Each structure stands twice: as C-alpha cells, then as structure tokens.
Image (cartoon, rainbow, N blue to C red):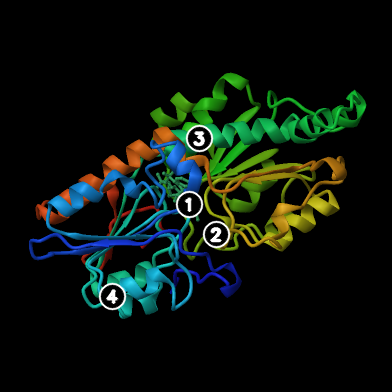
Amino acid sequence: MFSAIRPAASTLSRATRTRTFMSSAAAQDKVVAVLYPGGKYAKRQPKMLGSVENELGLREWIESQGHELVVTADKDGPNSTFQREAKDASIIITTPFHPAYVTKEIIDNAPNLKACVTAGVGSDHVDLEAANARKIGVYEVTGSNVTSVAEHAVMTILVLVRNFVPAHNQYAKGEWNVAEITQNSYDVEGKVVGTLGIGRIGRLILQRLKPFDCKQLLYYDYNQLDTATEKQIGCERVEDLEDFVSRCDVITINAPLHAGTQGLFNKKLIDKMKPGAWIVNTARGAICVKEDIAKALEDGQLNGYGGDVSYPQPAAPDHPWHKMHNTWNPELGGGNAMTPHISGTSLDAQARYVAGTKDILERIWGKKTQVEANIIVENGKYVSRSYGQH
Ligand code: NAI
C-alpha cells in the first residue's frame, strides 16, 4: 500500500496567517486550505491567488455560501494549524507547491472529511488508499497548469544542455572565459529526448520540442497513445524501462508519484542511462533518490539534473540538490538547474487552478457530478488511470 509520505520534522514551517470566519448563517462545511506564504510579495502582486494572504480569491464567495474558511501555511507536525483544524474539516484544499501531507492518520482523525481538493495537479500528498477506505473524494484541477510546467521543462532542458547556469554565473561575476563554458555546451538538436509519462504534460513537452529537430522523441508509459497522436507528435513508444533510459540523452519525468514511481530513478536505473545524460524532473522529487542523483552528478554518470520539485517540500537547507554540481563547472553550479516548486504556479496558472477549485466546490455544494478528468479517487475507487494500474 502506498501512503502519503510524511515530511521530516525538521521541515516544520511557520504559520503565516490563519483567519477563521463564521457567517451568521449556520456553517454547513468547514473548509481548511493550506497555501504557500506570500508575505510582502502577495501584497505587491494581488494576482498571486495561490498564497495564504490572497486565499485563492475565494473567501468572500465561500462565506457567501454559508461555509467557514480557515487558511494557513502552517502545515507540518501535530501542533500545526493545519493538523489541528483538519480534525473537524469537511473539505481540505491543498496545493502541491506547499503541500500539506494528508496522511492516513489525519484522515482517520477527521470524521467529517468528505473531499480533498488539490488546487493544481498532482495529489500524491494525499494518502489515496486511506481516502478510498473512507470513500473520501480526491479531486484536482486537471490540465490547469500543464502548459506552465511544459514550458518550464523545455526551458530546463535547454538550460542544462547549453550549459547556461555556469555561463550566467561566470558573467555575473564580471568574468569572460568562453572555453570554461563551451567545454560542456551542446545543442538539443540531434539529441534523443524521452519522457517518462506521456500524459498531458509529457506530450506538451514533446510537441514543444518538435521544432528543435531532435534525433528521436521517445516515451515510456503503460498508457499508450494512439497511432495518429504518436504520428502528430512524432514520438515512439519504448516498452521496456531500461531500454528506454539507455536510449535517451535527455529524460524528462512526467508521471505522478505513486507506488510504481517512488524512488524509480535510483542508482541502479541511473547506471543504465547513457553516461553524461541529463534528467529534468518537474513531476515529484520523490520519484528520484536524492543521494543517488547527487552522486551520479559527482561521478559524471549524469551531466545535469534540473526541475522544481523536491521531497519533502519545502526542501530542507541540507537537501543535497541545493548544492550538487557536475564535474565540468563545479564552482559555477554546473549541471544544477533546480528551482523551488514554481513551474505550475505562474500567475497565469494560478488564475486557472483557482477557477477550477471553485468549480469543484460548486459541484460538491450543488451535489453535481465532478468533471471526470478531475477525479483521482471517488467512492472508494481510483477513477484516474495515472496513479498506477488499478
Ligand atoms: P497526467 O495524468 O495527464 O499524465 C500522467 C501520465 O503518467 C499518464 O499517462 C500515466 O499513465 C503516466 N504514468 C503513471 N505511472 C507511470 C509509470 N510508472 N511509468 C510511466 N508512466 C507512468 O498528468 P500530467 O498533467 O501530465 O501531470 C503529471 C505529473 O506532473 C502530476 O501528477 C504531478 O505530479 C506533476 N505536476 C507538477 C507540477 C509542477 O508545478 N511542477 C504541476 C502539474 C503537475
């Protein structure tokens, strides 16, 4: 059984703001939302709806429906605002960017809980088995930020292959040494690029790479595309995982985190890759074994690793991915294209996942069926075909 993974206690985050409001009408549902702290940036940028300060822009509407809303960023540990407030919540809203880990224990201690809504895409931070055992619906805003992630992944592929990070860092230091950078700078043209997972994001990435004239665009997925779509994208399926990784110069990971993908990219699999290949992972940090990635960079088996996801989140200061580097430009951060979890929460994406979250709530309160693509589990069953073969 796969359980929502617990973060280390050392990653406890501080409460940014908690506001509770009861409308004068009898509250029907208590909604607890865990969002990322926006601080002065959220004040400066009101479009940052995904922050705790801006409350998804939904407070007024939720309260006008007669419901209660609690918003917090304080999410980890039994004394956190989230874990205390979750006990009598009917609906929990979370975001992958600052994930509240909705464990079996939290679910078991929340007798009124009927739905978990992910404001974004990727619901691995909810224990889906525990949700099924209680027939709690887990919904997400499918498709809301897939273009944003695909853009980030393509950018990261380019950044790594062309050796951009060391080039920029060198220039910012006031230096000019062409050879120091070009010793490890290539073109994406002519490379074999493969995606693990050919869902919404995987296929958008390959579509965006088509004009780069890669040698081959490959994919590995138990869900196969139809021939017409493969032809339109110009990609080819590889059935065997080791065969797939051994053929790629660049691997982009675009599958959800579940029992079949957790720790998949470990030393054993990385050793099957072409020496000097690149990995871009915007899916979930725990799909890769963090120590094995850092070591492979150090040993030269990997040339670069980039993405925006770590486990747990926020990544602790001693997480090896903050400082890892390759053998070519160690002092300039060569081979490291990591960012905090930002790809799927561009301001454009936030507007879309907020609209989708509102739609999911409206359907819950209006007793309407959910859009099928948004349902991960419901009535004790997996509806999504992306969380392993159930
Ligand atoms: P999707 O559900 O459209 O596609 C996922 C694909 O992965 C499916 O085709 C599925 O069959 C495949 N898959 C599942 N297990 C696999 C395995 N073991 N091996 C190979 N393929 C496998 O999902 P979408 O929208 O493409 O998103 C993918 C993931 O990306 C999300 O689950 C989430 O974890 C992550 N994501 C990250 C974001 C970010 O901000 N960094 C934002 C949005 C999504």
Q: Amino acid at mark 4?
A: Ala
Foreground disc of the pair 2, 4: 2
Of the image marks 4 and 1, the number of the one nearer the N terminus? 1
Tell me which residue sits at (92%, 26%) in the image. 179
Q: CA distance from mark 4 to mark 3?
A: 34 Å
Horizontally, is 321 left or right of 124 in the view?
right
> In this figure, which residue is indicated by the disc labeled 2?
313
Residue at the disc numbered 1: 97
Callout count: 4
Residue 142 location (% of width, % of height): 34, 44
**Label 4 vs 3, first from the N-terminus:** 4
Amino acid, disc 3: Ala
Which residue is the site of mark 4? 133
Name the amino acid type tagged 1. Answer: Phe
Viewer can see residue 267:
no
The residue carrying mark 3 is 150
Amino acid type at image mark 2: Gln
Q: With respect to residue 75, does 243 lie above or below?
A: above
What whole-number distance in Å separates the C-alpha atoms at marks 2 and 3?
A: 21 Å
How far is mark 2 from mark 4, CA to CA? 26 Å
Mark 2 element type: loop
Position of the N terminus by quadrant: bottom left
